Amino acid sequence: MDKIVEMKNITKEFPGVKAVDGGQFDLNQGEIHALIGENGAGKSTMMKMLYGLYTPDSGTITVKGQEYGGLTTREAIDLGIGMVHQEFMLVEEMTVLENIILGFEPKKSRNRIDFKKAIEKIEHYIENYGLDIQLNKKVRDISVGEAQRVEIIKTLYRGADILILDEPTAVLTPQETEKLFEIFKNLRDDNKSIIFISHKLNEIMEISDRITVMRHGKHVGTVNTEDTTIPEIAKMMVGREVFLNIERKKPEVGEVLLSVEDVYVPGERELSKIKGISFKLHRGEILGVAGVDGNGQSEIVEAITGLRKVEKGDIIFKGKSIKNLSPAQIRKLGISHIPEDRNKRGLNRPFTIKENLIADKFQDKEFSKGIVLNEKKIKEFAEELVKKFDIRPSDVNLSAENLSGGNAQKIVVAREISNDADLIIASQPTRGVDIGSIESIRKILNDIKKKGVGILLVSADLQEILSLSDRIAVMYEGRITGILDNEEATEENLGLLMTGGYLNEKV
Amino acid sequence: MKKSNYINAILSILVALIIGGIVVAFMGHNPLEAFAQLFRGAFVGKFNFGTTLEKFVPLLLAGLAFAVSSKIAVFNVGVEGQLYLGAMAAAWVGFTFSNLSKVVHIPLAILAGMLAGALFAAIPAILKVYFRVNEVLTTMLLNYVAQYLTSYLVNNPFSGGTGVAQSPPIYESAILTRIMPPSRANTGLFIALGMLVFIYWLFYKTTVGYKLRSVGLNRDFTDYIGVNSRKAIILGMMLSGAIGGLAGAIEVMGIHHSFLDNFSSGIGFDGMLAALIAKSDFGMVAIISFFIASLKSGALAMERYTGVPKSLIDAIIAVFILFATMEGLFQLKRRMKSKKEVDEHVG
């Protein structure tokens, strides 16, 4: 097979960070090549250089036999390179067809677009690759999976035969992911080449032909998928052995801790984003909430923690209603909250590590007398947590601004766990966090469960839900479509519930 | 604030002076002599140095008031109005109560001034947090309210009856002692410096300061940790207004000894400028205010002895502001650029 792309000795420096240092990558014609690594490993940066969005500081990029020091986006497109970004670049108010041909319209005459010709060309992709889309719908009316297919057709339409996809499965349900992989295979069979950025190991093993692993901006290795295993790849990514699967014991559940009773909650735009949710959570259990992002998970969490008003229904915690209390009152009663977005809520980034760690406790007697903060106690407390949770850097007086995602998230987890709450609401606790930190955060959650703490775990990562939860509630469009015991849950039946389907045996 | 920012500010001052010097040379004067006179006029002799201090106090307080508001992410353009109302309240206490001892009368007048400023500043804060009314708009409009209200008061009910638009003189017991006669510098200087230290302490060593800084940097975070961000913003804004009111009170009690109509003529805005240049760092606000005050007080001497027009000093101040903010501009651009690239390459 021919090497269609070869990137050699690439370096790229951003102010203060070496994003890529000695990066290597090559792509054969007609293969699916996975590029993996933890957050900040430099994989997106590598691909943005190939697509011409960044220029490498040094190194060479060879595409189809031509050597370049750096490409412009225009050159990249002309060379047949197309990129599907994590965030879709589509005009919401235009139809799918208009979006696809935008900027590359076939013309009948100077001012008239030849829609017929465009449709013919697009139909060809739809049939050959199984990319079913509805051409005359507006983009705002189609699903995420379909929007992604539109993006893929858009790049094909512009003549791409090298496709770069940046974490395409992050927003998809398992079923949609399956479908996407079918499309990948069809494209490969037609001799197109695909670069697929991901950090989901099982997906990569399933679909790719070769795997390139990056760590801290460096090239760790490129292997044939059939010659390797998941643990081996994980080890290459992290630099040591990792154990993501938690030894989960069926818990001895205690009393009911939290009871959500037919709750309605308004959303940003809709009147009722949550339409009548009920569930119970016991001491000593982890209740997982699965679902595609945006189906009301954030709203229910905000309603329980007092950050959003409850419209109807009741929320009972330890026998008392906490409906529409203030966040401060709810915290005092014993509910901790690891929020889904650490940059928005979880941390005050410009604050120091120390200040972030005492954010919910600075008014406690232990840390302040009257209004005067007890700096010594605060420092001691923060240093203890930093040590216990292995937060790096360990200087508590540094600003939290430049911390990596994993260490930043550890600050949030450390703070929320250190106040001995009875209930912890963990929303996407490992999103955008490196594997090493995922491992330790999951272990922490599993350990405190054993102490009789109840945990409501909201996560878009099914593997996380399956490996930690004792019971799993699935949300779809503001409702719970089913609650399963861990033993009866599989990716398949969860996926079905996540898309609004109901299981044959009602639960 | 980082050390490098202090160095940058000093450099901006130097560059502004050098450019001013070149202009002076072009005008056919000796720049060294002009600056020597400027320096002399600002620092040498009790009267000169006293005048510098006298101008420094209101600038520092107005700058501090603005810096406090910007620490809670509110743009308080209304310091001028808060200053007028504070001055009026202090003057009223000063000329109304006749038989109080100095120990009671002075604190009472000062507190009245601060209270008036605080309450006046609470209006835009409440409108902002509960009704989402932009505070720049409200504070700017309220400046007119304050200015015309006080103007009405000194012309009618509180007129001193002298034909000049001013209130009756305040009683001796409410007057702040002059510390460098014949200049008008007074003990208000120590109150202002005390305020500077207090504000620093409050912001960095107390729970109140934690809340205020938190709400200024990240409102979502503040609500999430269980601190009411609305209350924090109102409190911070009232603090800002109180400092503005204090500036007015000291002007009345230490300088004019009565409320003169339109006496401020932009102290609030000069202070805002100082705070903007200082990027709301409390220590820097003091340094910049002192620099501007020295230039202003030295200008007269320079004009008198060398013939270099006083207005040149305003030009130097403008150049200085230009450089100081330009440096800020570069910094902002750099930060935005690096942030954008970092954001991108994290994804």
Image: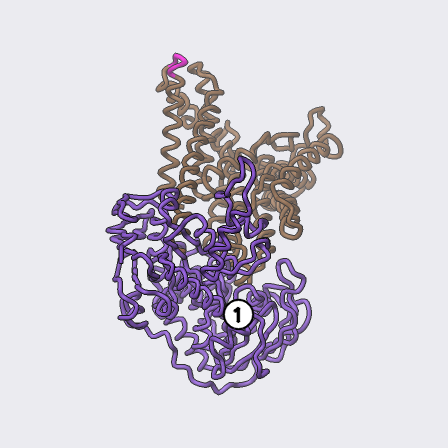
Question: Residue B303, relative to residue A383: is it above or below?
Answer: above
Q: Residue at x 37, y 74 (%)?
A: A244
> Picture coordinates of residue A451 (x, y %)?
45, 81
Residue located farthest toward the bottom when viewing the structure as drawn: A252
SS type, badge 1:
loop
Question: Residue A463, relative to residue B84: is it above or below?
Answer: below
Q: Which residue is tagged 1?
A: A291
Front position in the image: A204 or A316: A204
Residue range highlighted in magenta? B25-29
> Picture coordinates of residue B242 (x, y %)?
59, 45
Crowding around mark 1 (Cα neighbors within 10 Å: few <14, some 14 to 19, many 20+) is: many
The tint of chain B in the picture is brown
> Picture coordinates of residue A142 (x, y %)?
57, 58
Horizontal relation, residue A235 to residue A309: left or right: left
Front position in the image: B145 or B228: B228
Q: Residue at x 58, y 71 (%)?
A: A500
Type of amino acid under label 1: Gly
> Picture coordinates of residue A37 (x, y %)?
33, 62
Q: Is residue B28 magenta?
A: yes
- Among the chains pictured, the one given purple colouring is A
Question: Residue A8, relative to residue A111: is it above or below?
Answer: below
Q: Is residue B244 magenta?
A: no
